[in-house]
Amino acid sequence: MLTPYVLGSFGGGVLADGNLLRNVYIDEAGISFGGQDPFVVVAAVSVQPDKQWKELKRYYHDLAKEAHPNADDHDRYVFHAKDIWHGSGDFPRKSHDPFRPAWSWEKRLRLYQQLLQVYKLFNLRIGIGVVNRARYSEELMAEFPNATKAAVNAHAHVAAFIASVQQIDNHIEKNFPDEVAQLVIEDSQKMRGILTTFHAGYTELPDDQVVPIDEFRTDRIVDSLTFASKKQSILLQLADHAAFTVKRMFQGDDDMKPFFKTVFEQSLVVGSPHKTRINYRYPDAHVPYLSLGDDERNED
C-alpha cells in the first residue's frame, strides 16, 4: 500500500486532576467523492484546552469583529480558507451590496496571514498527512480491482487521516508518555462510519491479541471520535486553514509559498508512518464505501 507523506508534531495540555490531555482538531482538504483533487490532505492541530482554548476563541472573535463588524455572532464566526483564497462566500472579489463589500486580493492575503500566524502566536504544532490520489488509486486498484471509485477515494482519506493520528501517537509516546489525546473531527456524513470503524481498529485491542509488528495500534488516543461542525467546535478552523494551505502548495500554487512557510515552521518533518498496516473491526452493519470489492477484514 502507498505510504502517505507526513508532516507533524503536536502540543499538549494539562487537566485539573493532573492527567494530561490534548484536544486534537482534525479537518481535510481535497476530499471529494468525485476525486477531482490530485492530493488528499488531512491536518491535525493540537491545543492545550485549559491554557489556550479561551484565548484562541477570543483571537477569532476579535478577528471576526474586525473583518465583519455586522456579523450576527462573532463568537461562532468561521473563516473558511477556500472562500478567503478564492474570493467567494463572505469575501467576494466583486460586490454591489453595501452590506457585503468586496474584498481585494491584497486585503484577503492580509487576513489569511492573520489566520495562519495563530500557530506561531500560540505555539501550536501541526501534523499533516498527504496522499497522492492517483498513485494511491493505482496501487489500491492493483490489489482490489473490483473497488469502486468512491471506495478508493474514501480509503485515500483514511490513509491521510491515519498518518496524522499516528504522528500524534508517536509524539506522545516519545515526549509525553503520561499524556493522552482526544480527536475532534469536522463532521462528514459520508466518512463518519468509515473513520469510526478504523478508529476502533487502532484503539481497541484485547489483552490476549498479538499485534503484527507493522500494524498501528495505540492506547494513547482515547475515547470515541467527536464529530462536529465548525460552528459547533470553532477551533476546527485551525485544521481547515492548515489543510487548505498544504493542499494548494502541493498543487503548485506559487502564491501560497509564504503561507506554507508559516505552517511549515510550526511543523516537524518526521517522515512516513513506520507502521503501514491499517486494521479495522468489520462492522455489523454495512458502512457505505468501506468495501473494496473483496473480503478485506484486517487487511491493509
Image (cartoon, grey):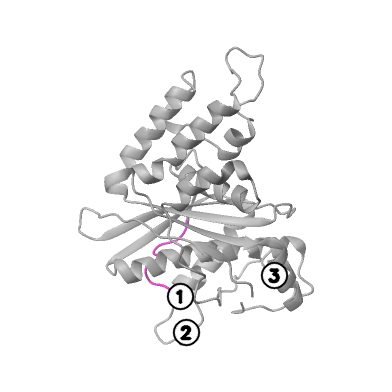
Pointer 2 residue: 211
Nearer the N terminus, badge 1 or badge 3? 1
Pointer 3 residue: 291
What is the spatial separation of the Cα atoms under label 1 and label 3, in whole angstroms? 22 Å
Nearer the N terminus, badge 2 or badge 3? 2
What is the spatial separation of the Cα atoms under label 2 and label 3, in whole angstroms? 23 Å
* Residue 239 highlighted magenta (yes or no): no
Horizontal arrangement in the rendering, residue 231 relative to residue 266 (left or right): right
Give the extent of the magenta segment. 216-225
Number of numbered tags placed on the structure image: 3
Q: Is residue 68 above or below residue 267?
A: above
* Residue 219 highlighted magenta (yes or no): yes
Q: Are marks 2 and 1 in contact (CB under 8 Å)?
A: yes
What kind of element bears circle 3? loop
What kind of element bears circle 2? loop
Pointer 1 residue: 217
Nearer the N terminus, badge 2 or badge 1? 2
Main SS, magenta region, reads loop
Q: Amino acid at mark 3?
A: Ser
Q: Amino acid at mark 2?
A: Val
Between 132 and 56, the one nearer to me in the picture? 132
Between 78 and 119, the one nearer to me in the picture? 119
Q: Residue furthest right?
A: 146
Horizontal arrangement in the rendering, residue 204 relative to residue 28 (left or right): left
Quadrant in the picture for the N terminus: bottom right
- Residue 270 visible, this angle: yes
- Splitting the image into 4 quarters, where does residue 19 fall? bottom left
